Image (spheres, helix red, strand yellow):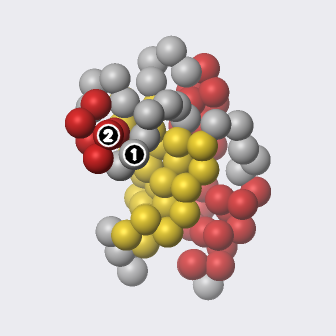
Amino acid sequence: MEVKLILFSSKECSRCLALKSKLKELALEFGALFEEVDIDENRELAAERMVFSAPVVVLEVDGRESARWAGIFPLFPIESLLRRISS
């Protein structure tokens, strides 16, 4: 099973910088992949994924979106879901 955390971010997003390191740690801890997509440089991909602001975190399992968080959110739900998926 392939699990991936995708952070949709932008250079102007200070929250994105803080999230990036924490999400990388979670991905490493739970054996997930981590990817960052700059929504300003990848507008088409962001639009395809219905992402219009940053930050947005998408959790994919086997290439399918399983969960999404946007704006200001705690990391606990992401960690909890990763824990359930990996067990």
Q: Is residue 21 visible?
A: no
Under tag 1, what secondary structure?
A: loop
Residue at position x 43%, y 40% from top? 51
Q: Horizontal and vertical percent for residue 62?
A: 35, 74
Give the Cα distance between marks 2 and 1: 5 Å
Residue at position x 55%, y 55% from top? 68
Q: How many marks?
A: 2
Query: For the residue carrying disc 2, how many other residues have a C-alpha within 10 Å: few (<14), some (14-19), or many (20+)?
Result: few
Q: Horizontal and vertical percent for residue 50?
A: 39, 45
76 shown above or below 10 = below
The extreme left residue here reads 44
Residue 78 quadrant: bottom right
Residue 15 quadrant: top right
- Residue type (three-letter) at the residue carrying disc 2: Ala
- Look at the numbered discs 2 and 1 and tell me whether their residues touch, using CB distance below 8 Å: yes
12 shown above or below 87 = above
Query: For the residue carrying disc 1, how many other residues have a C-alpha within 10 Å: few (<14), some (14-19), or many (20+)?
Result: few
The extreme bottom residue here reads 87
Under tag 2, what secondary structure?
A: helix
Residue at position x 57%, y 78% from top? 85
Label ID, residue 60: none
Residue at position x 60%, y 43% from top? 70
Q: Is residue 83 visible?
A: yes
Q: Horizontal and vertical percent for residue 72?
A: 70, 37
For disc 1, the marked residue is 50
The extreme top residue here reads 12
Quadrant (top left, top right, bottom left, bottom right) of the C terminus: bottom right
Label ID, residue 47: 2
- Tell whether 38 sits left or right of 79: left
Of 63 and 84, nearer the camera is 63
- Residue type (three-letter) at the residue carrying disc 1: Met
Quadrant (top left, top right, bottom left, bottom right) of the N terminus: bottom left
